[in-house]
Image (spheres, rainbow, N blue to C red):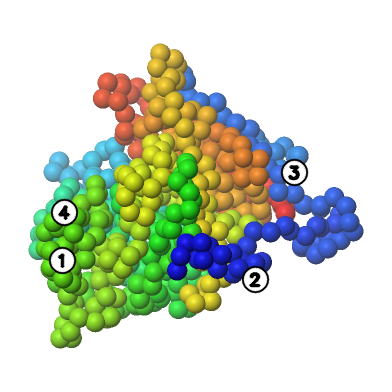
Amino acid sequence: MKRKALYLAMMAICSATLIACSGDDGKDGVNGTNGQPGQDGKDAYTNDITFYEVAPAVTDTEKNTIRTSTKVSVGGEMQNIDYTTLLYTGDEDNGEVYGRVKDYQDNVIKNEDESDYMCNGTEGGVGSGLDHFSILQKNDKLYMVSQFECSVGAMYINELEQDANGELSAKEGTLQFVSQAAEFGGFTHCAGMTTPWESHLGSEEYEPDARNPGGKYYDEVSNYFWAGDASKNSPYYYGWTPEVQVNDAGEAVYMKHYSMGRFAHELAYVMPDEKTVYLSDDGTNVGLFMFVADTAKDLSAGTLYAAKWHQTSEKGLGEAVISWIDLGHASNEQVREVVAAKPLFSDVFDTEAAVDGGCPTAGFTAVTVNGDKVTECLKLKDIDGSGSVDAADGVLASRLETRRYAAMMGGTSEFRKEEGITFNARDSKLYVAMSEVAKGMSDEKGDIQVEEISCGGVYSLSVALDETIGSAYVAYNMKGLLAGQSADYTGTALEGNSCDVDGIASPDNVAFLEGTDILVIGEDTSSHPNDMVWAYDITKKSLARIATTPYGSETTSPYWYKDINGFGYLTLTTQHPFGEVDKNYQRPETVDIRSTAGYVGPFDFSKLK
């Protein structure tokens, strides 16, 4: 279908399903309750929220600490808020140590000096440390599930207590390690979310390249998780979407969703229908994916789709119509059986060397994925051993080698540093962060040909009903919402900020504050020595800096909880303080380098629309 025709078709869908597209809300009168019409006049509720801004970190004290907004205006009423730490990596409770890593037999892993192997991002362990935690409301209790971004991934669960003022704290005697041994261990857990059914949905980032297995991440798993026995390891064990549910007994139930594909999962984001899931792929020349489950609240089986970018504008971050390529239906059980057999890359594809960007032999397809535009020539093999290469083999390839197979089928594999995802239900807008717009996105080849923006940006995607796919949340366009701007502060107190301190740099995880106009944007950047968290008003198009973190740390896990027993919370993880610093920087010995899990709040948003 031509681009113009496709765009008009999608707009017709939007017009026919107005409730799923952006539109004006009806008025609530002063006597209206629960969204019902009342007497004409001023709305009884409001979506007006304003954070009091934090200045950039300039002094040594400011650069070495977590600083957040202390006041917020909601509907014109002032509220006091603050940052509260729930847990530090290294905290001990219930015989466990928060962030301590265990092996395939759930034994504590030891370093060569017999100290515990910790995932902190600054004290050994290949990886970045604590990344995301979810708050779950189950069994009339509050639970906290945390995941750690080291090559040997770790997860922990504990209970939280909430006082009469809404303040949260970790409940003593409840910390437990979440075993992943039954599913080949965890790997480089990155971003996550709390699902609508109150489970923790995580990620496994930077999947090992099965064509060329090895490297520091993969080797670290062989050496530590598999206790030095590399024969026990397989690259196909990692790069999936894990989920942790809490059963009626308060126990963590861990699983991996092989049905959702294998790639560098930054985040899996579940839409309100509890079936449609958007999946971001972090790296260079990667794809954007969508999964539609067969059954609500059950991600064990469904159909996977790859995005196709049909560019309509090259200006700034660019703009495109998005279509979706069907990669087939699969179940966890079906894919896991193949994974457990430890296949080789050569069991999935035949390969040959590309010549001048093409494939010499008929039947091979040239694809460009993974890194700096390396062209591969691939041909699908008989993976299931049925005696012929058929659709069933395509389905298995779409899960084992999702990015490569999607590119073979025509999906776009040119995105650069695709990060967090969030959703604005009121306006039917999905937001996706790109920490850098470069490489395949700006090289004047392929589907995407936009300007290079080293400071990154955030895209907006409109969603609507697609009856063919069977989801009311299918994205049909994608365009730039907010871009970072380069700057040079040489010779000033802001030296080292190569991106404007009054704008975003390398946006990472994002969260939309339901009921407001606020999109929260966290950074993972070296372009701001002190990473920041921003509140972007999508209506006023204004930015407010609401947090800065210690030098060399990353702001991960900003996630919004609008109503936990009547209080709102914005969670925030400060990952590897002083872990990414100039080699000449001398860290004060008194400064704490432990990663922290905490929140900004509590908020009273009872008057939000």
State the image quarter where residue 273 is shown. Answer: bottom right
Q: CA distance from mark 2 to mark 4?
A: 47 Å
Q: Which residue is mark 1?
A: 345
Residue 588 makes an appearance in the image: yes
Q: Is tag 3's residue or tag 2's residue first in the polypeptide sequence?
A: 2
Q: Is tag 4's residue or tag 3's residue first in the polypeptide sequence?
A: 3
On the rendered structure, is 34 left or right of 68? right
Mark 1 closeness class: few <14, some 14–19, many ≥20 residues within 10 Å: some
Which residue does the image show at 20% across and 43% down from the upper left?
115
Q: Nearer the viewer, residue 330 or 156?
A: 330
Establish if 165 lies above or below 293: above
At numbered mark 3, what does the secondary structure look like: helix, strand or loop? loop
Q: CA distance from mark 1 to mark 3?
A: 57 Å
Q: CA distance from mark 3 to mark 2?
A: 34 Å
Establish if 172 lies above or below 553: below
Establish if 600 lies above or below 310: above
- Residue occupying the far right of the picture: 39
Q: Amino acid at mark 2?
A: Ala
Q: Which residue is mark 2?
A: 16
Q: Nearer the viewer, mark 2 or mark 1?
A: 2
Q: Nearer the viewer, mark 1 or mark 4?
A: 4
State the image quarter where residue 507 is shown. Answer: top left
